Image (cartoon, grey):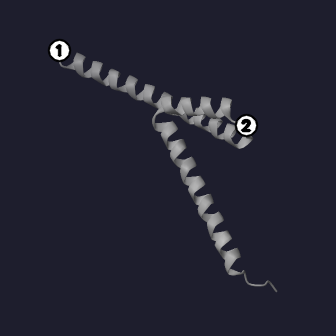
Amino acid sequence: MEQPLTLEEKKRVRFEATVDILYLLSLLSLYVGAFLNPIIGIVYAIILKSGSLSERAKRVGHICLILALIGLGIWVLFFIIIVVIGVAVGLGSGF
């Protein structure tokens, strides 16, 4: 049978859980920022991949680069669609 945790152990476990949640939230905001603003994502990726010593940070940089390239592709696709729609509307109205 397990012994119940002491008050200090409970505090330590709660603190570690809070740190884990904050770490995941910061990663989420980094990934969303890299996806929505590809230039910033590429800058994040360069900084993390070239300046980091840990493999975890390099992996985060790699994921930022992938998300930035996907975001850039989506932005370019939206731009092309808007131009095509604009040209189609312009041709349809007699310009």
Residue drawn at point x = 51 percent, y = 47 percent: 29
Where 32 falls versus 77 (above or below)? below
Residue 42 lies in what quarter of the image?
top right
Q: Amino acid at mark 2?
A: Leu
- The answer to which of 91 and 5 lies nearer the viewer is 5
In the displayed structure image, the side of residue 9 where residue 34 appears, left or right: left
The residue labelled by disc 2 is: 53
Q: What's the mark number on residue 67?
A: none
Where 60 falls versus 86 (above or below)? below
Where 82 falls versus 10 (above or below)? above
Residue drawn at point x = 71 percent, y = 75 percent: 9
User: Closer to the N terminus: mark 1 or mark 2?
Assistant: 2
Residue drawn at point x = 69 percent, y = 37 percent: 58
In the displayed structure image, the side of residue 66 where residue 72 appears, left or right: left
Placement of the N terminus among the 4 image quadrants: bottom right
Marks 1/2 in contact by CB < 8 Å: the verdict is no
Q: Residues within 10 Å of mark 2 (few under 14, many from 20)?
A: few
- The answer to which of 23 and 62 lies nearer the viewer is 23
Q: Amino acid at mark 1?
A: Gly
Where 26 falls versus 80 (above or below)? below
Placement of the C terminus among the 4 image quadrants: top left
Instruction: Give the spatial CA distance, label 1 vs label 2.
Output: 61 Å
Q: Secondary structure at mark 1?
A: loop
Q: What's the mark number on residue 94?
A: 1
x, y percentage for residue 92? Answer: 22, 19
- The answer to which of 18 and 29 lies nearer the viewer is 18
Residue drawn at point x = 63 percent, y = 35 percent: 48
In the displayed structure image, the side of residue 66 where residue 82 appears, left or right: left
x, y percentage for residue 75? Answer: 43, 29
- Which residue is situated farthest in the top direction here? 95
x, y percentage for residue 90? Answer: 23, 18
